[in-house]
Image (cartoon, rainbow, N blue to C red):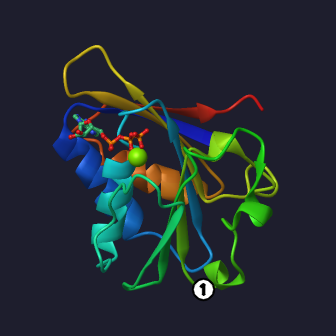
Amino acid sequence: MNVVTITLGSLAATTSLGAAIGSSLRPGDRVLLAGDLGSGKTTLARAIGTALHAEPELTSPTFILISEHSGDLPIWHVDAYRLPVGSDALRAGVLDERQQHGVTLIEWPEHLVGLGEAGADVLSIHLETATDEGARTAEIRGARPELLAALSATSGSTGQITMGDAHE
Ligand SMILES: Nc1ncnc2c1ncn2[C@@H]1O[C@H](COP(=O)(O)OP(=O)(O)OP(=O)(O)O)[C@@H](O)[C@H]1O
Ligand SMILES: [Mg+2]
């Protein structure tokens, strides 16, 4: 599987990455958004949603596990933070047959088991807070090399990109 690392120098860079991702997603795609508290998962999810004209806008409500949004494609936004580590995705209600017709964005996927084969997701993104105020790094793995290449290209003006094979 390929991996790209993009330096997101500002909030605007994260928003443009989200816009590029949102406009590339197809029915059935799933995006995993991992990273520490405050690393920017919801911010990126919201930007992906905006590109898909999500209604209502994606937010981060405290006690909601999954929210459903209409848009160019139906969108499911999952925040598994409050589930104990090791929770079964199907039993917890994170997986839904209808998701094959839309896109599913999952924050805190590391709390879940049973999400399916590793690498099957169109994008698996790990966000990290960088030392610079307002900067983040996004390590993006994905099943579609052409999508990773496109994301690198669109983020070219805002970030530093390294592309290579993930050793897993
Ligand atoms: N480059 C950046 N990318 C993303 N967010 C940024 C950036 N710079 C600053 N921020 C700020 O960092 C915060 C990120 O919060 P956000 O809710 O997106 O994080 P999160 O990873 O979803 O957190 P949680 O684990 O609580 O769900 C926001 O306040 C956002 O404005
Ligand atoms: Mg969040």
Q: Residue at 33%, 29% (x, y): give it.
A: 136
Q: Is residue 7 visible?
A: yes
Q: Position of residue 7 (x, y in %)?
A: 33, 30
- Answer above or below: position of 90 versus 15: below
Q: Quadrant of the C terminus?
A: top right
Q: Quadrant of residue 24?
A: bottom left
Q: Quadrant of residue 133?
A: top left
Q: Quadrant of residue 99?
A: bottom right
- Answer above or below: position of 6 versus 108: above
Query: Which residue lies under the disc numbered 1?
Result: 101
91 displayed left or right of 29? right
Q: Quadrant of the N terminus?
A: top right
- Answer above or below: position of 24 versus 39: below
Q: Secondary structure at mark 1?
A: helix
Q: Residue at 29%, 77% (x, y): give it.
A: 56
Amino acid beneath label 1: His
Q: Position of residue 50 (x, y in %)?
A: 27, 69
Q: Is residue 157 visible?
A: no
87 displayed left or right of 62? right
Q: Residue furthest front?
A: 63
